[in-house]
């Protein structure tokens, strides 16, 4: 009861602080009042500095985003230049490869020509050899005929044949025959010699042709080697460009990741950028809401008492810590837990997550986590609690710790689907009551519920891990 009185007292005080102090305060000394005023002023300054701190961080974040965007643009330009260079290099390689193919064809043709010429030479050599053999044989025949004539001078010789004529006419005819034989031998010999000379000159010619072809082949081979060296250089250059491209792509991916992280950070900073005016308004409305919540709780307690008195032992209610709050959504998928000390992995900025994110696609119900009273509802465009989008703030008078004393607890439901809020300020709600649908209003990435639990009134410093109290 003492606690309840204290709350009512504080609530009245809060209302008085906002509304200028016009009524006399009876039960307080001047000193106490001064102290309260000082504390309130301190809190106001705190809120102010928190707000300007968030503003500053948002500005820093935006400056970094601009830097990263510029870097990405620069990298994109480098990538475009590299892609052009790669294409040029690829074309050069293709041209060189065509040249190599052409030259290879020429080499093949020349080699075929050489083979043919070699066969021709072999053929000519054979013919020359045959001819020489025949010349040699005939020479042998003639020589032996002459030798036989000189040696015998007898019946075997032409002379004997001639001089053994029986008459002059016989002599003439024999002489003609012999001279015809000798002439014929001589002609054949001459022809064969001429043939041999012809063949030899032809062979010389063919051998020269072969030598020329071999020179040509050597030249082509050298040219081909040169082209292959050129191609190897081009391929190495292309490899360098490909590696450059890969490095640029990695850099770009890193910058893109950084950009995403900066955007997330920005979203979260916006989420916590609540102006002084917002906070003052919240405090005023909370004072009224908690009074209502206490009243409700007392009435319920009396009812419980009555039903217990009549022997109807009802469920004692909230029970111990860890099972106090109703799971606030129709999905249990937690995508980002409460973490007041979260440090950005890249920027190093501490960006606390003062709530729990629960997310699922489709239509998802949002439920009141406990009996309570609606402090206020917000919409994305009403200029208050801007980063939270459509949101509902509830205040409760419950035993969150399970230590037997009831105290003020606040719950916040953010990024609700536009136009689905079913409750209004000052309205009492009961645990598990459907209050809205999950959405993605405000700053954030995709549909999710951002759910906060605070001991006392709604303030950043009061945030506690919802996971510790949900069932
Ligand atoms: Zn969140």
Image: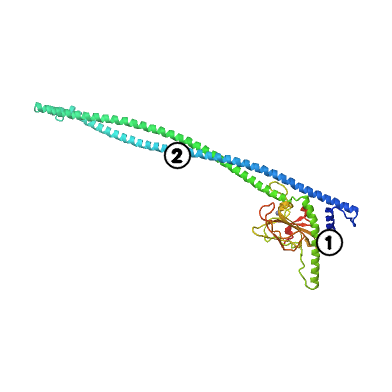
Marks 1 and 2, how far apart at CA: 97 Å
- Location of residue 237 in the rendering, given as x and y in whole percent from the top left corner: 54, 38
In the image: residue 260, left or right of residue 325 = left
Residue in the foreground of this view, choosing between 380 and 32: 380
Name which residue lies at 33% across and 32% down. Answer: 203
Q: Position of residue 98 (x, y in %)?
A: 46, 39
Q: Is residue 261 above or below residue 428?
A: above
Residue 196 seen in this snapshot: yes
Look at the image and tell me in which quarter the C terminus lies: bottom right
In the displayed image of the protein, which residue is found farthest to the bottom? 311
Please provide percent x and percent y for residue 390: 71, 55
The residue carrying mark 2 has its beta carbon less than 8 Å from ligand 1: no
Furthest toward the top, the residue is 168
For marks 1 and 2, the one nearer the N-term is 1
Viewer-closest of 37 and 170: 37
Q: Quickly name the residue at label 1.
A: 4
Q: Quadrant of residue 468 in the image?
A: bottom right
Q: Is residue 194 left or right of residue 249?
A: left
Residue closest to the eye, 31 or 115:
31
Q: Which residue is mark 2?
A: 101
Q: How many marks?
A: 2
- Please report the residue visible at 81 percent of the width from the left and 57 percent of the height from the top: 287
For the N terminus, which image quadrant?
bottom right
Please, is residue 434 above or below residue 253 in the view?
below
- Can you tell me which quadrant of the image ligand 1 is in? bottom right
Residue 216 quadrant: top left
Element assignment for label 1: helix
**Classed neighbour count for the residue bearing mark 1: other residues with Cα under 10 Å, few (<14), some (14–19), many (≥20):** some
């Amino acid at each position: 009861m003492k606690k309840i009185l204290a709350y009512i007292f504080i609530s009245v005080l809060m209302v008085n602080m906002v509304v200028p102090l016009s009524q006399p305060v009876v039960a307080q000394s001047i000193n106490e009042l001064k102290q309260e005023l000082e504390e309130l002023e301190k809190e106001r300054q705190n809120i102010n500095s928190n707000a300007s701190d968030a503003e500053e961080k948002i500005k820093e974040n935006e400056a970094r985003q601009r830097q990263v965007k510029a870097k990405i643009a620069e990298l994109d330009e480098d990538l475009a230049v590299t892609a052009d260079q790669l294409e040029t290099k690829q074309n050069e390689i293709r041209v060189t490869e065509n040249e190599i193919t052409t030259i290879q064809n020429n080499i093949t043709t020349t080699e075929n020509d050489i083979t043919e010429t070699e066969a021709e030479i072999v053929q000519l050599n054979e013919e020359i050899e045959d001819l020489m053999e025949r010349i040699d044989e005939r020479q042998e025949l003639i020589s032996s005929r002459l030798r036989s004539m000189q040696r015998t001078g007898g019946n075997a010789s032409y002379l004997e044949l001639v001089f053994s004529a029986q008459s002059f006419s016989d002599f003439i005819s024999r002489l003609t025959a012999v001279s015809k034989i000798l002439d014929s031998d001589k002609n054949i010999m001459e022809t064969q010699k001429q043939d041999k000379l012809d063949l030899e000159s032809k062979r010389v010619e063919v051998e020269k042709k072969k030598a020329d072809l071999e020179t040509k082949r050597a030249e082509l081979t050298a040219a081909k080697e040169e082209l292959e060296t050129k191609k190897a250089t081009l391929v190495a250059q292309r490899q360098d460009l490909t590696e450059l491209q890969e490095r640029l792509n990695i850099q770009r991916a890193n910058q893109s990741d950084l950009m995403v992280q900066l955007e997330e950070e920005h979203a979260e900073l916006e989420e916590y950028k609540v102006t002084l005016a917002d906070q003052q308004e919240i405090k005023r409305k909370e004072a009224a809401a908690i009074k209502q919540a206490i009243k409700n709780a007392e009435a319920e307690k009396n009812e419980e008492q009555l039903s217990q008195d009549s022997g109807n032992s009802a469920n004692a209610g909230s029970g111990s810590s860890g099972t106090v709050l109703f799971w606030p959504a129709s999905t249990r998928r937690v995508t980002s837990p409460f973490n007041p000390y979260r440090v950005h992995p890249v920027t190093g900025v501490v960006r606390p997550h003062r709530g729990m994110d629960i997310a699922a696609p489709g239509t998802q119900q949002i439920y009141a986590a406990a009996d309570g009273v609606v402090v206020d509802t917000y919409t994305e465009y009403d200029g208050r609690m801007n980063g939270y989008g459509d949101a509902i703030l509830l205040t409760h008078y419950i035993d969150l710790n399970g230590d037997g004393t009831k105290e003020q607890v606040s719950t916040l439901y953010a990024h609700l689907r536009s136009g689905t809020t079913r409750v209004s300020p000052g309205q009492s709600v009961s645990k598990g009551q459907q209050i809205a649908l999950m959405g993605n209003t405000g700053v954030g990435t995709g549909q999710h519920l951002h759910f906060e639990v605070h001991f006392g009134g709604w303030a950043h410093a009061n945030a506690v891990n919802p996971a510790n109290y949900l069932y």
